[in-house]
Image (cartoon, rainbow, N blue to C red):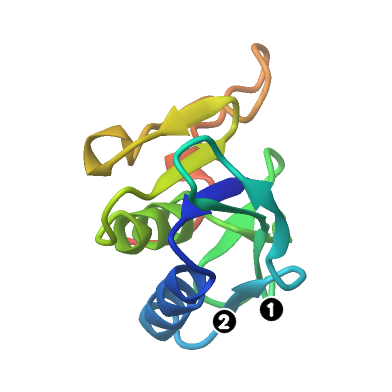
Amino acid sequence: MIAHVSNSGVLYDAMFNVSQRFEGNVRFKREPEFIGKDRQGRFKYRFTLTVKSSSGPGARRGVDGRAIAAACWHVHGYFFERVFQFDGAMIEAGGLKMEGPGDNWQDRNIGSQARPLLFSDACECEG
């Protein structure tokens, strides 16, 4: 994912917020990587959300139901929600450009045609 933000503090604020919501189990896979500025002068950072424990809150499940060390749809949605509280933020994720809160919470199939699995159903969150 790539975030276009006014400063890296926006990402760390969102991480603090979402990690608290999921009992401290959410983290960046690596520190956000600065990759330049966009045409509007916003800083661009590449990052990946993951979990400390695949059996903890906010962990995603695979098509076979097994826990994997990846952040679920709800973690991403709450993280993006927080980022969008800052003026002018934009996020590129999964081939989508999200330019505000109205673009957030988009669900998609992460399984196959034979074994479909919506991103929102690939965890044990209650919403």
- Residue in the image at 69% along x and 46% along y: 62
Which residue type does callout 1 highlight? Ser
- Residue in the image at 64% along x and 12% along y: 113
**Image location (x, y in percent) of residue 95:** 59, 25
Q: Are the residues flagged by discs 1 and 2 in contact, CB closer than 8 Å?
A: yes
Which residue type does callout 2 highlight? Asn
- Residue in the image at 33% along x and 40% along y: 104
* Element type where label 1 sits in the image: loop
**Label 1: how many residues lie within 10 Å, few (<14), some (14-19) or many (20+)?**
some
Left or right: 124 as drawn, with respect to 114: left
Dot label at residue 117: none
- Residue in the image at 67% along x and 58% along y: 47
Q: Is residue 99 placed above or below 23 in the rendered structure?
A: above
Q: Is residue 66 placed above or below 54 in the rendered structure?
A: above
Residue underneath mark 1: 53
Q: Tell which of 64 and 39 is nearer to you.
A: 39
Dot label at residue 25: 2
**Image location (x, y in percent) of residue 70:** 68, 59
Left or right: 105 as drawn, with respect to 13: left
Q: Is residue 125 placed above or below 73 in the rendered structure?
A: below
Q: Tell which of 16 and 20 is nearer to you.
A: 16
**Image location (x, y in percent) of residue 33:** 74, 62
Left or right: 50 as drawn, with respect to 72: right
* Element type where label 2 sits in the image: loop
**Label 2: how many residues lie within 10 Å, few (<14), some (14-19) or many (20+)?**
many
**Image location (x, y in percent) of residue 81:** 31, 56
